Image: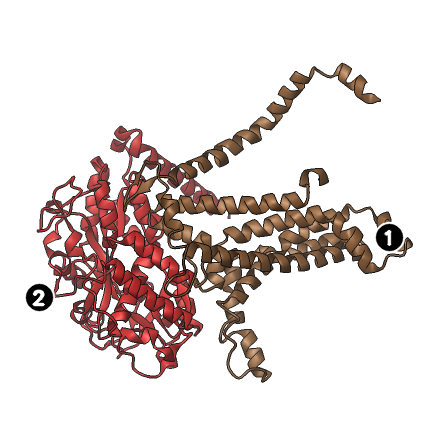
Amino acid sequence: MSAPTASAHAPSPSVHALKAWWQAAPFALVFLLFFLIPLALIAMVSLWNFNEYELIPAVTLRNYASLFEGCSQLTDNGDLCVTLNTYLSTFKFCLLVWGITLLIGFSVAYFLAFHVRSSTMQTVLCVLCTVPFWTSNVIRMISWVPLLGRNGLVNQVLGGMGLVDHPVEWLLFSNFSVVLAFVHLYTMFMIVPIFNSMMRIDRSLLEAASDAGASAWQTLWNVVVPLSRTGILIGSIFVITIVMGDFVTIGVMGGQQIASIGKIIQVQTSYLQFPLAAANAMILLAVVLMIIWGLTRLVDIRKEL
Amino acid sequence: MTEPIDTSAGVQRRTLLQGTAGILATGIAPFVHAQEKVVLRYLGTAVNQDKAIAEKFKADTGIEIQYVAVTTDDVTKRAVTAPNSFDLIDTEFFSLKKIVPTGNLKGIDTKKIKNADKITTLFTKGEVGGKVVGDQGTAPKKVIYLEGEKSKKFAAAPTQFMSLIPTVYNADTLGIRPDLIKRPIESWAELLNPEFKGKTAILNIPSIGIMDAAMVVEAKGIHKYKDKGNMTKAEIDLTIKTLIEAKKAGQFRALWKDFNESVNLMASGEVVIQSMWSPAVTAVRTKGIACNFQPLKEGYRAWAAGFGLPATLSGKKLDGAYEFINWFLDGWAGAYLNRQGYYSAVLDTAKAKMDAYEWAYWMEGKPASQDIKSPNGDLLAKAGAVRDGGSYEQRMGGIACWNAVMDENEYMVKKWNEFVAA
C-alpha cells in the first residue's frame, strides 16, 4: 500500500543503487586493502620458488606437491604423511571441542535465557562467563601447569585421597589437556550467539507447546532448538574456525608434541620458507571455507537473521 | 606532586620526538645528521639487549642505543627482508649462511676495530688454548671472514673484513635435576634412556633440536656423523626416526621453544633432564631449585653471536656503530657478560674489569672464594661452589659441534614437522 507512494517520492532505482554502493564502499575498500589484496599476494607467493635466502618469482606447483609428497602411502613408522596426519588430528580436536562447547554453551544459554528471570541477573551472569578472558591467553594456559601437572593440585588431591598410587600423567601435555583448554577458552563463543537467538524466541510459542501437550523435552527439541539454530550456527563457525587455525593452545597444552597446521606454517615462515607456508595457508583456507560453506547449507543464515 | 609527572611526560615526548627524527633521518633526510644526536637501532634478541649496557654506553659516549627485540628467527628474517630497519645487528653466526648471500651486510673493517687482533682464537682459528676444537656445523671460523667489504662470499683464509664481530658465545649441554635423578649423568644418551620415560624434553627449534638429537644418536652408538651440522638426507631420516620411536614410546614429556617454557618444565619437576640454555639453568637456580648444566663426555653444542653492519649504513651512524663495537670489546661489557655466565670475545680487556675472585670462579673453574653475584645483585653461587663445566679451556675446549644451517635445511624442517606430528 505504501510502496507505490514511497517509490513515487524516492529517487530512481539507479540512483538508489548508487547510494547503496556508496554506503558499502568504505567497508568494501577496507576489505579489499587489508584482506583481498594480501590474500591474493599469499596465493601468488604460494606458486613461487625459493631458496635459503630469497624468493624467486615463478609459477610452480612444487610447494603444493611438497606438502602432499608421500601422502599416497604410509611412512616407515606406519603413520599417514604429515599433512594428512595433522589435518586429521585437527579435525578430531574440532569435532570434540565443537561437540562439548555446543553442549555446555547450549545448556548455559538455555539456563540464562529461560530460567534467569531478571534481566539484571542475566547481564551479571553473562559478564561472569567472560571471566576467563580477563587475563592474557598465555597466563591462562601456563596456569594449567600447577593445576594439572605431575606435582599439580589435581594430582595432589587424587593422591591424598588415595585414589591413585602414581601421579596421573595424561592430565597435562595430552589430547585431554588440549581439549580442556579449548573448551575453557571458547565455550563463550557458543554461549553468546545461542543466548542471543534464544532471547528472540517468542515466549508464547513455549506456552502454546505446553498447552498442546508437549513434554519439556519435546518443546526443547521441536521448538527451542530449531529456533536457536542461527545462534548455534554462528557459534559453531566461531569455534571451528578458531580451532582449525590455532597453534598456541595446541602448542602449550600439548607440550608442543601435537601437530597443528598453524604450527607448521609458523615453523616454515621462521625458516624463510614463505612459499611453502603460503601454500599451506591456502589449503587451510580452502578447508575452512568448505566447512563453513557446508554449515551454511544446513542453515540459511541470511534468511534467519 | 604534579611537577615530577609533568617532567616525565615531557621527557617521554622528547625521546619520542628524537626517535621519530632518527627514523626519518635514516632514509629521507641524511643532512639532518649534522644537528641530530646519533641513535643506533640495535636489532637482536632480548637476551643480549641489556639495559645496563645501553645506559653505560650512552654515559661513556653520548650515543643512544635503541633496542629492537625480536626472536632469533626474526632477526634473520628482518636481516633478509628489511635490511634498512636497523643500524646494528646482533645475530648468531649460523644465520650468516642465510644473510651474507643477500649482500645485506657489509664486511667490518678490522683496521677500525682496536681489539680485533685480541679476539679469541676460538673465532679466528677454531682453537682454545692452542688446541683445535670441534668444528662440525657452522663453526665461526668458517664464516667470520668475508672476501671484501661488499662481498657475498665467505673467505677461506683470514682477511681484513669480518662478517660479524663476536659478542657472546657459550656451549650448551643438557640440564638436569640432580635432586630427582640422584645419580651421575655423563652422556647425551641419557636423554633417551627409558629410565626417564615421560620426564625428558627436547628443544623444538628444528635446526638446534636435531643437533641435540644427533649428539644422542652418536652417544648411543647408532651412527657416527661426518658432520652433525650438515647431515645427508639419509642421516636426517635416521635421526628423526630415532626421535619418532622415542616419542611414540612416551619418552618426551614436552618439547619447548621458549626459554621460559624450559624453566617452567624444569622448575615444576615435569621434566628431570632436557636440552637447556645456560641462563635458563640460572633462572631455575634462582628459584632455589637444584639444577645442573651437566658437562657430558661427548662434549658441547656451541653457539656464538656477533655484531654485523647493514650494507647501507654510512656517515655518523656508521662511525657510531664502529664506536659501539669498539666500546663493547673494551672490557666493561665483556665483564658484564662474563658475570652472567656467557663468554666475551676479548678476554684480556674483560679480565681487567673483573675482580680476581670473579675471574677465578667464572673463567678458571676455581671454587668461589666468596659469594658470586649476578650483575643485578642476585646470589648465583655461594662461596666454595664451582662452576659447571669448569674453566674456560675445559668447557670451550669440549665443543663437539656448532649451531648450524644445513644444506638440506628444507628437507630437515619437513622431517622435523613429521616428528612433531607423529
Amino acid at the residue labelled 1: Ala
- Can you see residue A193? no
In the shown orientation, is residue B139 left or right of residue A110? left
Res. B179 image quadrant: bottom left
**How many numbered callouts?**
2
Vertically, is B390 above or below B258?
Answer: below
Residue B320 or residue B208, whichever sits in front: B208
Residues B84 and A158: in front is A158
Q: Position of residue B416 (x, y in %)?
A: 35, 59
Residue that sits furthest to the front in the current view: A72
Instruction: Sort mark 1 into few (<14), some (14-19) or many (20+) by Cα contacts within 10 Å.
Output: some
Q: Is residue B13 left or right of residue B331?
A: right
Q: Which chain hosts label 1?
A: A
- Seen from the viewer's position, the closer of residues A166 and B114 is A166
Tell me, what hue is chain B? red
Is residue B250 among the parts visible in the rendering?
A: yes
* Left or right: where B420 falls relative to A15: left
Task: Please name the residue shown 18% across and 48% down the image.
Answer: B163
Q: Mark 2: which amino acid? A: Gly
Q: How is the image coloured?
A: by chain
Q: Give the position of the C terminus of chain B as an image quadrant.
A: bottom left
Colour brown, chain: A
Q: Which residue is mark 2?
A: B130
Q: Which residue is mark 1?
A: A209
Which of the chains bears the disc numbered 2?
Answer: B
Residue drawn at x 36%, y 64% is A76
Q: Which residue lies most toward the right here?
A: A211
Image position of B325 with respect to B372: above or below: above
Q: Secondary structure at mark 1?
A: helix
Q: Is residue A53 placed above or below A191 in the rendered structure?
A: above
Residue A173: percent from left, percent from top? 48, 67
SS assignment at label 2? loop
